[in-house]
Image (cartoon, helix red, strand yellow):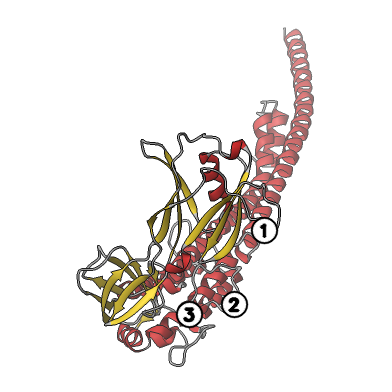
């Protein structure tokens, strides 16, 4: 309704919806400002969604690099063993393909010695007073074991608590209780235990505790003995990892004749992990393209970070993770390109599988070191160098930190939303005051128009009465 129409209507005294008129005037001022603020809030919220999408894509890429950043990820040697019940076998990344003859002649044993028999686990020893046990291993004293609770059970607790390389158990044979002490494997670990009641004064010899002795040898300590391709090898442990490079043998029992082990290289898992890296990289690149494309029709994400410098910064960093030389290059394998990984003119990561096969076949060790630096369990706190994959994982982890660039941008957008919502609150309050002012002004105008109409009607009545009077 135009101003002249309002005036004419008021002048005619026909009445008007003052509240509706005031609301229309307020809305005319409020709506465009409100829409602008809402648009800013929506844009900031979309940016936060976009940053979350970048973080998710980076996390997936980190997981893909993470399958190549440990030397153990390149444990492609698969051992085969014709007598797995006699010994186990495992291979590390340094193992080479080949075949071996293994014969287990003797497993390493630990000395096991039993004490004299006691009537009860709580039988008082040394008259109930504390005493000592003297331990010697290989003829060399290892120290004293202080038995403060002078019972068979207390003696067992003291031996185990001393942590001198022997352990004890209390066995109920049905005819009494015996303390069985076990040492470590290997012939050099033979031991002896003697008691000391603590009454001797130097230089007098120590006085043994009555009834406390270890006279029965249940098992003698021996070294393990095996033949590897006909050569005899002895070790003091049943875990042997220094005979065949990169191979660990765990001995269980004697073999029946010679067993055959075959170390065959299987690179299927490694190739799958490299293919997974290609997929993760291209998914990451596609995510960034969608987020930065104003013309994208992808709901929720399309174009929400168009023009944002963060996209190019993250893209450049990630691309360098693939294209730069490894921090642990080899003579032949220095970078991802040497195993067939390259970025085409469309920005996609591609894999030349024939080149990868050649690298794995001819320079397997260098491939492993190039990716992993020959280390395991790396983190952002591990010292450099970390290899290509290890370095990528560390870099991405830093990018994903709450103090990283992405979260910083997201926090800035969140702060902007808070600011815009505060502006909206101020606008609402100002419009409420404007509405109140309009209502007051129009009410006064209505009152004036009402009074004018009443006067007009009164005058009209008077004139009509006069006319009737004269006309009559």
Crowding at label 2, few (<14), some or many (≥20) Cα neighbours within 10 Å?
few
Question: Dots 2 and 1: beta carbons under 8 Å?
Answer: no
Percent coordinates x, y for residue 105 in the rendering:
28, 71
Please state which of the two labelled residues, at mark 1 or mark 3, is closer to the viewer. Answer: 3
55 sits to left or right of 452: left
The numbered mark, 2 or 1, whose residue comes first in the sequence reads 2
The secondary element bearing badge 2 is classed as: loop
Residue at the farthest bottom position: 331
Q: Is residue 78 visible?
A: yes
Q: Is residue 102 above or below residue 400?
A: below
Q: 358 or 174: which is nearer to us?
A: 174
Q: Is residue 46 above or below residue 128?
A: below
Q: 19 or 367: which is nearer to us?
A: 367
Q: 150 or 373: which is nearer to us?
A: 150
Seen at 56% across and 39% down, the residue is 125
The numbered mark, 1 or 3, whose residue comes first in the sequence reads 3
The secondary element bearing badge 1 is classed as: helix
Residue at the farthest front position: 204
Quickly name the residue at label 1: 412
């Amino acid at each position: 309704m135009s101003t002249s129409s309002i005036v004419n209507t008021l002048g005619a005294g026909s009445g008007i919806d003052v509240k509706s008129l005031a609301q229309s005037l307020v809305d005319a001022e409020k709506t465009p400002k409100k829409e602008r603020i809402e648009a800013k809030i929506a844009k900031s919220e979309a940016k936060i969604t976009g940053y979350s999408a970048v973080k998710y894509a980076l996390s997936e890429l980190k997981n893909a690099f993470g399958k190549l950043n440990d030397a153990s990820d390149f444990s492609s040697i698969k051992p085969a063993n014709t007598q797995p019940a006699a010994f186990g076998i495992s291979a590390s990344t340094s193992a080479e393909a080949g075949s071996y003859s293994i014969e287990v002649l003797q497993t390493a044993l630990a000395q096991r010695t039993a004490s004299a028999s006691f009537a009860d686990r709580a039988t008082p020893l040394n008259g109930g007073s504390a005493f000592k046990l003297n331990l010697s291993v290989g003829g060399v004293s290892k120290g004293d074991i202080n038995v403060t609770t002078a019972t068979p059970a207390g003696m067992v607790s003291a031996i185990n608590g001393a942590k001198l390389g022997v352990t004890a158990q209390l066995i109920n044979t049905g005819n009494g209780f015996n303390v069985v002490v076990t040492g470590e494997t290997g012939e050099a670990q033979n031991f002896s235990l003697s008691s000391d009641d603590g009454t001797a004064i130097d230089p007098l010899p120590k006085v043994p505790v009555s009834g406390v002795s270890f006279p029965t040898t249940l098992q003698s300590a021996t070294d393990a003995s095996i033949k590897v391709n006909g050569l005899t090898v002895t070790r003091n442990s049943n875990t042997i990892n220094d005979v065949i490079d990169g191979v660990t043998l765990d001995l269980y029992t004697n073999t029946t004749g010679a067993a055959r082990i075959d170390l065959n290289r299987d690179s299927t898992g490694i190739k799958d992990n490299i293919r997974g890296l290609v997929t993760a990289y291209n998914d990451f690149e596609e995510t960034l393209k969608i987020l930065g494309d104003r013309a994208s029709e992808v709901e929720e994400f399309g174009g929400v970070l168009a023009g944002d410098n963060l996209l190019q910064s993250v893209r450049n960093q990630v691309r360098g993770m693939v294209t730069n030389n490894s921090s642990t290059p080899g003579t032949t394998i220095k970078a991802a390109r040497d195993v067939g990984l390259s970025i085409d003119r469309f920005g996609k990561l591609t894999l030349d599988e024939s080149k990868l096969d050649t690298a794995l076949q001819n320079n397997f060790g260098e491939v492993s070191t190039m990716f992993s630096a020959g280390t395991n369990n790396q983190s952002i706190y591990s010292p450099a160098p970390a290899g290509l994959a290890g370095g990528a994982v560390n870099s991405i982890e830093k990018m994903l930190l709450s103090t990283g660039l992405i979260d910083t941008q997201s926090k800035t957008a969140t702060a902007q939303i808070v600011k815009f919502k505060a502006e909206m609150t101020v606008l609402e309050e100002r419009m409420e005051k404007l509405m109140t002012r309009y209502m007051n002004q129009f009410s006064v105008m209505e009152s004036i128009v009402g009074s004018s109409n009443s006067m007009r009607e009164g005058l009209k009545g008077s004139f009509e009465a006069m006319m009737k009077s004269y006309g009559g």
